[in-house]
Amino acid sequence: MDTAWNLAQDLVRIDSSDPGAYEGRIEQHIKSLVEARIAKMPAELAAAVGVKELEALPDRRNLMVTVPGTSDEPRLVYICHMDTVTLGEGWSEGISPLGAQVIGDDLYGRGSCDMKGGLACALSALFSLLGRVAAEKRLPRRGFSLVCSVDEEDFMRGVEAAIRAGWVGPDEWVLDTEPTDGQIQVAHKGRTWFEVTMTGVTAHASQPWKGADAVAAMAECVSCIRHAIQATPAHEELGCSTVTFGQIQGGYRPYVVPDECRVWIDMRLVPPTTTEAATRMVEEAIASAEAEVPGCHGSYVITGDRPAIERDPDSGLLAALRGACEACGTPAEVGFFTGYTDTAVIAGTCANHNCMSYGPGSLALAHKPDEHVPHADVERVERVLTALLDRELW
């Protein structure tokens, strides 16, 4: 079953970086592949298969392909994002981000594991389903959709648009194909983002007492937040809450007391710590900084708020996916995803308890130079995703 492997190479060669080329070319490429498969089906069955586009952002379209079922059971949905992070620098000599080189057992290129390898596996499973529908001249019992989303690597506005349009909701069984290191990953840390601004008073650096150092105040604020997060309780599965101060701006000359500093904060929160609790930490840190550096004043805005998703041991999709893995001879450990995915957005927004991740590759290789995915991983996930459709749709 090398359909997915060949598809993955084709997809890697298409630049869909975000920001950058975005998803236009790859969305049209996938749409044309799907339409070519549908055209080979008997006319009455081909007419039943739905292909929809949804402009989630200007000139950036989600794509959904639906094979309807004959029952009212919840649809099974594979959701895969089409965008990648930027191509980046630092790739080894002879390896191009868009080259799709196969070296040994590995496919190299931007998005090979995050997540064009997984997207290729989902497409292969869809093509297998369309072939079975055509061969048996009937629709499956349970419906199936493949959703290809935009903007996952930025603000996840693609999946938000899909939710608003009713493409997914609280009842569907939803699986994304992010790289999961061979695991079924069923839980996610929350993701809360803050932008904190500290203002002060400018002065000559030789007379700092005449000013108020906004950078010094921000340093106090950062230290307080870091220690507050470290003091939060751990979760038995998700581990500890973490904080990263990913970007900072402040001052304009080394000999001038800086009158403004801004920092962007990424918190990955686990229950029982919530965004509300984190907000109190930020407010207390700002108050401490203002007291430590008189004349400075702080403010903040919350720029992202995604809740943590905990495992539901009674999930029907989890049981079905584990069964498909075992049937394929690749039993999978159940774990959690350290990042945040489209399925996590669906789970958090729609209170959907059947959302999880299972895909080829390792998250440790994503977003880096020399990103790659092993052939064996792609083949394994292709088999499992196809088996899951065969077992649960008919």
Image: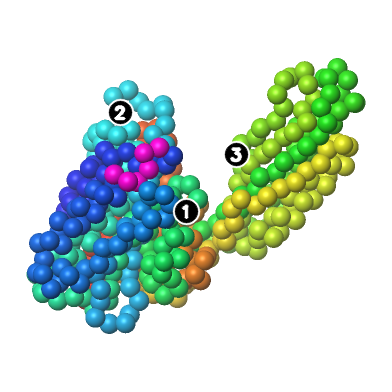
Q: Which residue is mark 2?
A: 95
Looking at the image, residue 127 lies above or below residue 318: above
Q: Position of residue 32 (x, y in %)?
A: 20, 52
Image quadrant assignment for residue 47: bottom left
Hey, what amino acid is under mark 1?
Met
Q: Which residue is mark 3?
A: 246
> Do tag 3 and tag 1 residues touch (Cβ < 8 Å)?
no
Q: Position of residue 388 (x, y in %)?
A: 27, 67
> Do tag 2 and tag 3 residues touch (Cβ < 8 Å)?
no
- Residue plotted at (14% across, 76% down): 138
Q: Which residues are magenta?
A: 20-25
Where, quadrant-wise, is the C terminus in this rendering? Answer: bottom left
Answer few, some or many: residues within 10 Å of disc 2's Cα (few below 14, many 20 plus, some between 14 and 19).
some
Q: Which mark is residue 156?
A: 1
> Do tag 2 and tag 1 residues touch (Cβ < 8 Å)?
no
Of the image marks 3 and 1, the number of the one nearer the N terminus: 1
Q: Residue furthest front?
A: 58
* Of 69 and 124, the residue lying toward us: 69
Image quadrant assignment for residue 44: bottom left
Q: Position of residue 11 (x, y in %)?
A: 26, 44
- Is any part of residue 202 visible from this angle? yes
* Of 347 and 18, the residue lying toward us: 18
Q: Position of residue 242 (x, y in %)?
A: 62, 49
- Residue plotted at (75% across, 56% down): 280
Answer few, some or many: residues within 10 Å of disc 1's Cα (few below 14, many 20 plus, some between 14 and 19).
some
- Secondary structure of the residue carrying tag 3 is strand
